[in-house]
Image: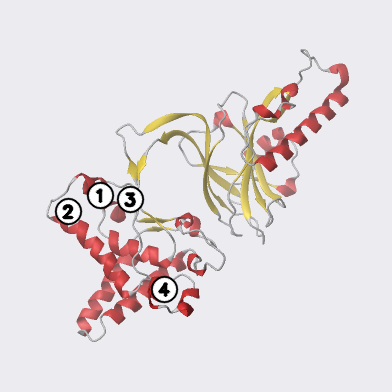
Amino acid sequence: MFPVSPNPVDEASTIILQLMYASNVPKCRDMLSVEGYIERKFDSCKARDTKHLPVLFHNESKMLIASIIDDLEDDEQRQGGNDKKKGNAVALQTIDSYLFRTNKRHPSPDPVWNFTIDLQLTPVKGDVLHLAITRGSGSDARKIVAMGAFNVSELPRDEVITKTLCPISRKVKTTKGLLELGAGLNMSKCCTLSFKVLKTLNQRCRVYFIRHGESTWNEARRDGNYRKLIHFDHILTPKGIKESLALNSTWTNSAEKEEIDSTLQRFLAAETILSSPLTRALQTCLLSLQGHPTFSEKGIKLCRDLREVKSLGGFDAKGKYYGTKIMHRTEQKLKKKVKEMTAGADAADIKQHIHMIENICRKTTIDYNDANSQW
C-alpha cells in the first residue's frame, strides 16, 4: 500500500485522532474501549440548539446533550443573577465535539485499537482533549477504568504521544484536577495511552489485494465434505501452497530479468504489507511476498479487520490463537503440509524444504498489532 500522487499529503484543518494502544491496563473481565471528546467554552443558549453539534453515535450523543442542558440549567439556577450576562448567554465549560468510542477489545494489559477519527472540529486555544479507557460487555453498560485530560495546543502533531491516565480510584471530578494530576503520575506504574494527533493525511493510496491460496475449507466445500467445514482457522492445502509460491515466482522472475513495467514498479514500491491474522492468509503472505523490498525491510503487520465478516456459524473467520502463537501455528502447519507434499522424496530435499519454511517464518518481522489479544 502506498500513496498514489507525488504530493499525497495535505495538512489537516480539523482535529484528527489516531488512538493506538494502551499499557498497564488494570485487570478486568470486560471488553475495553477508549472514549473521548473535546471540551470547549461556548454559550449556554446555543447548547439548547443541538443541531449545531456533529453527531457520530446518535444515541450516545443525544443522551450526552440532554445531560449538558440539564447541567447548564442547574448551574444557571444556582448562580442566579451573580453571573455577568450578555443577553441570556453564560460562558461555561462543556462538550463541543463528537463523543466518540473506539471498537472493543478483549481484556488485556496491552490492548491495541488503531482507531482513527476526524472530530470535524477546528482547534482553538483552550481546547481540552478528554480520553478514558472504559470497560463493559453491553452496548451501553460501561465503566471508566482510567481517564485523562490534555491541552490540545500542547500536543505535538504526527508523533506518537504516550500519556499517563489517572486511575478511577483517584476520584478526580474536574478538568483542572485531571490536568494537574496527570502531569505528576509515574508512567511506569500507571496505565498509559498512546495516540497521535494527525497533521498530515494521505489523500489517496493504491492498494494491492492478494487472495489467499486454496484452503482446507475450499477443498472441503469442493469435495462436499461438510464435516471439515466446521473447523476453526483453516490452513492452506498443498495446492494453496503451490499457488502462493507460483505468485512469488511470477513477480520475482520479472524483477530478476529487469522486465519491470509500471505495474510491477508500483507493486515493488508498496510501503506497507498487511495481512489477516488467519493462518491461511498469513501463510499466503509469507510464501508469495518473500523477497519483496518492504517484506525484507519492515516485515508484515497483522490486522484483524482484514478477515471476512463473521456470520452466524462462521467458524472459518475465527482464529485459534493470538500474539506470537499465531506465527508458531503458521510455521508448524506449513511444515506439516510440506512434509506431506514431499513424501517419498529424498531426505535431503525434504530437509531443504523444511529449512526454507523455518527461514521464512523465523526471520520475518511480524507486528502483531491488534491481533496481540483475543480477536
Mark 3 and mark 2 lie on one chain; the one further toward the N terminus is 3
Q: Secondary structure at mark 4?
A: helix
Query: Which circle, 1 or 3, is nearer the viewer?
Result: 3
Q: Can you identify the residue that label 2 sits on?
A: 255
For residue 293, side relative to residue 316 (left or right): left
Number of labels in the image equals 4
Q: Residue at x 75, y 39 (%)?
A: 173
The kind of residue tagged 2 is Ala
For residue 22, side relative to residue 355 (left or right): right
Q: Can you identify the residue that label 1 sits on?
A: 268
**Front-lying residue, 224 or 80:** 224
Mark 4 and mark 3 lie on one chain; the one further toward the N terminus is 3
Q: Can you identify the residue that label 3 sits on?
A: 208
Q: Mark 1 Cα within 10 Å, few/some/many (few <14, many 20+)?
A: some
Question: Is residue 358 at least partly visible in the picture?
Answer: no
The kind of residue tagged 1 is Leu
